[in-house]
Each structure stands twice: as C-alpha cells, then as structure tokens.
Image (cartoon, rainbow, N blue to C red):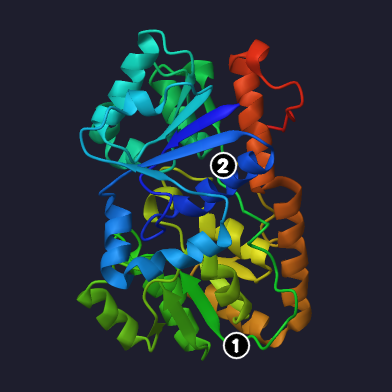
Amino acid sequence: MKVVYFTHSLDSCWNHGNAHFLRGVLDELIERGHDVSVFEPEDSWSRANLVADHGEDGLQAYRSAYPTLSSHRYAAGADVTELAEGADLVIVHEWNEHELVAALGKARARGASYLLLFHDTHHRAVSAPEEMEAYDLSAYDGVLAFGETLSDVYRSRGWGNRVWTWHEAADVRRFHPPAKEGLREGLVWIGNWGDGERTQELQDFLFAPAQEAGLPLDVYGVRYPEEAREILHKYGVRYHGWAANAAAPGIFARHFATVHVPRRYYATILPGIPTIRVFEALACGIPLVSAPWDDAEQLFRPGEDYLVARDGEEMARHLNELKNDPTRRQALVASGLETILARHTCTHRVDELLSIVSALRPTSAPSTMAAGELA
C-alpha cells in the first residue's frame, strides 16, 4: 500500500510532541513493506525553531535513530494534490494549513482514488473550536482522533461511525528500558511550558513536592519564558532546555522517577487522553507518578502501572516512597512495561490503522494485514 502523510514536521520534535508517535508508526509501516512518503512545509514552525536554536546538528539525533525515515519539504504555493497522486491512503495531520486540508478534500471529491483521513492529536476541537471548524473536511473519508472524548466531539458534529479513536503509543524499538542499569538519581520531567495551560499545576504537583521531598529535579523542554525560568529558579529546578525526543530514553535511564502533569484540557474537558510522555515513560521502565488524571478509557492500571497523587502532599509522599523503596519501584516498572507491550505500541496502532483501512475499503486491503483491536 502506498501511504502519504502530510505533517507539520517529521524532521523536528521542537514543541511537536506528535513526532514520537508519527515516527514510530511510519517506521512500522515501512518495516512491513508499505511505500511511505511524508511531506512537510519548507518553513515549518517547529523545524525553523529547532534549527534556529541548535543548527542543522539538532536534526542529527532523529536521523540517527530513524535511518529509514525522511520527508519531502514543499514550498509555499506547491500543488499538494500532485504530491498525493498514486497514493492508496492519505493522512493529514490537524496541524496543517486550512488551504492544504481543503485542497486534498477537493481532489478527493473530484474522484481521487485514495482514502483520505484527518488525524487530530490536539485539544483545539474544544479549546479553539472556531479554528477546527474552519477546516473543510466534507470530502474526507474519516477522522482519526487520539482519544474517545475527542472522537465524541466529532460524532456530535455529524461524523457518526466515520471517526475512530486512535491513541498515541510507544515506539518500543527505541523507547525501552536500558540494557544495563546504571546509577539513577533524582527526578526528571520532560515537557514544554506551553501557553499557561498547566503553570499552577506544575508548581503544585512537581516543583513544590520535589522540593519538599528533598529531591533534585531536572527539567527538559522549550518555550520557557523568563517568568517560567524565575519559577524554576525559585524551586531550585535544574533547567536544561530542549532535548531531542530520541534522547529521552537515555534521560529517563539516569533518574529514578518522573511525573505526569497533564495540560488542563486533558484533565478536565477531554479526560482519558494521556500525553505521549506516559507511553514513553512506562516503555522506558521509569516509575511514574501522575497528577490528577481520569483514565476514562482504562488504558492503564492506576496504582499498578503508575501512582496517582490527588494533591501536592500526596505527590510528595509518593515520591518519598519511591525514593526509599526499590521493590516498589521495580513493581511499577514491571507492571507499566507489561501494559505497554500488551496494548500500546506503534505496532498495535498500525494494526488498528490497517483494520480501519480494511473497513473503509475491504477489497483493496492487503490480505496479510493484521486486524488489531481498536482502542
């Protein structure tokens, strides 16, 4: 099958959390023998910021980790419908220009033979509905939404059985426990500051509890304004700036625990949608403690795969417990990894994608495709 994916960027993970999942799924498709082409704009915001901060060397970690992956960068004004010609399946990520989304839909309406799916991995459907409603999806065959509550938003807008819940997952070929355990010290948090969506939550569930427990805390991420850095300094946090997504397993391997602090929309309006960091952490074998988050779809086993803290005091208690109880840490690691390998790998998600393709066009689906259980 020839697959074409239009993304904001495959090259860059700078403030682009979907990069992990995208790379893992496309790599899995290639591994299975599918013909994959990826297109991203020449001036993508994520790539431009990464190169501005770190030069072309900033792209090397991704290229080394994914030697089979590459993307084609198209110029502004390019005819994107030509780029999709000959495809069997075209997937368009939601962080694309409205004009691109509309152009591919018009080509589909005129008789283009490919299946056309819209891939939504963000909360804008509820946080900025006017932006999402401006996308012309009228000729699209369906929507891939990264959580059931987001799928419900599309169903309420008339998509019915043409929306599928397609969660993110871990690329376990690259995100896995270290082959040899070394010294683990302190806490780590990998995440972007990002638009004030969890400023208070980070203080209440990460910075203050770490300080109270007397634990050193390392933070990696981008878009930390001066105000944010002042907050980090206040709590004695060691800030390291951007880290390549491909470097995350090594960073996790140097620390004994990490924390999940969901953005406000995923803790309230869109419950049940974990960030990619949950999949990454559990796949890499690091104990995880989560701020309040409703696992509404029962993706994991709270209390077994990770611990949950209802407030900052409970977070500090959990962190102290993990610091002093290696047996507890080992049990969490084993349980979390078991769940990832059983349900939440990019291999599982490719099985699900191929099942969706089969449902939409059964006569064209490869006879050898695996019919994975949909999330």
In which quarter of the view is residue 85 placed? top left
Give the crowd class for mark 2: few <14, some 14-19, many >=20 residues within 10 Å: many
Q: Report the front residue among 322 and 11.
A: 11
Image position, residue 50 (x, y; %): 32, 64
At x 49%, y 88%, the residue is 216
> Which three-letter amino acid code belongs to the residue tagged 1?
Glu
* Quadrant in which the C terminus appears: top right
Give the crowd class for mark 1: few <14, some 14-19, many >=20 residues within 10 Å: some
At x 59%, y 75%, the residue is 250
At x 41%, y 19%, the residue is 140
* Left or right of 53 in this view: 67: right
Q: Which mark is residue 185?
A: 1
* Left or right of 190 in this view: 177: right
Residue under label 2, please give it.
Answer: 167
Q: Circle 1 sits in a helix, a strand or a loop, which is it?
A: loop
Q: Which mark is residue 274?
A: none
* Count of picture labels: 2
